[in-house]
Image (cartoon, rainbow, N blue to C red):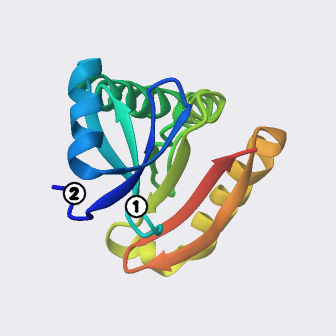
Amino acid sequence: MIRASEVRVISDDGEQLGILSITDAIQRAKDAGMDLVEVAPEAKPPVCRIMDYGRFKYQQSKKQSESRKKANVIEVKEIKFRPKTGAHDYDFKLRNIKRFLADRNKIKVSLVFRGREIAHTELGRELLNRIIADVGEDGHIEQMPNLEGRTMVMVVAPK
């Protein structure tokens, strides 16, 4: 697929072989049992390298999969509260919030109002402020509590 008539050739060990015609370059690659790969098509003349292209592609895919393994994926966990959530349930859910923060996940804390509870949004704000105080050093508030319809939402991220 190389269209140039002359190319600068680099051997598989990095040594420059000079400027050769395309047929000579392809012949040298075949003699070495490798492929001629165009590395820099914009250069004058284009730069080609003698290499094992299949092995090169394999190594690139391995590097890419390694970098994907090392990337940390942050999940968003959701914990739902109600304005009348009891003390035991609150403690249990707070323990889960702290565990999720320790696992480096974000938490979406939702406080759902039903029926006439929507008239007392201050109770919901008090509960969310209590959560903010109890989370303390484990995380920081990424999105402050705000009311979206009948749900008050807050996002807590790990420190």
* Mark 1 surroundings within 10 Å by alpha-carbon count, few (fewer than 14), some (14 through 19), many (20 or more): some
Towards the viewer: 141 or 5 = 5
Identity, as a three-letter code, of the amino acid under mark 1: Pro
93 vs 77: above or below: above
* Mark 2 surroundings within 10 Å by alpha-carbon count, few (fewer than 14), some (14 through 19), many (20 or more): few
Q: Which residue is mark 2?
A: 2
Residue drawn at x 48%, y 81% is: 119
Towards the viewer: 102 or 126 = 102
Q: Quote the CA–CA distance across marks 1 and 2.
A: 9 Å
Q: Which residue is mark 1?
A: 46
In contact (CB < 8 Å): disc 1 and disc 2:
yes
Q: Is 74 displayed left or right of 103 in the figure?
A: left
Q: Quadrant of the C terminus?
A: top right
Residue drawn at x 45%, y 27% is: 69
Identity, as a three-letter code, of the amino acid under mark 2: Ile
Residue drawn at x 36%, y 33% is: 50
Q: Is 33 displayed left or right of 42 in the figure?
A: left
Towards the viewer: 146 or 126 = 146
Residue drawn at x 20%, y 46% is: 23
Q: Quadrant of residue 126?
A: bottom right
Mark 1: secondary structure: loop
Q: Is 19 displayed left or right of 143 in the figure?
A: left
Mark 2: secondary structure: loop
Number of callouts in the render?
Answer: 2
Residue 158 image offset from top left, x and y in percent: 68, 43
Residue 92 image offset from top left, x and y in percent: 55, 28
Pointer 1 or 2: first along the chain: 2
Towards the viewer: 50 or 28 = 28
Residue 44 image offset from top left, x and y in percent: 46, 69
Q: Residue furthest right?
A: 137
Q: Quadrant of the N terminus?
A: bottom left
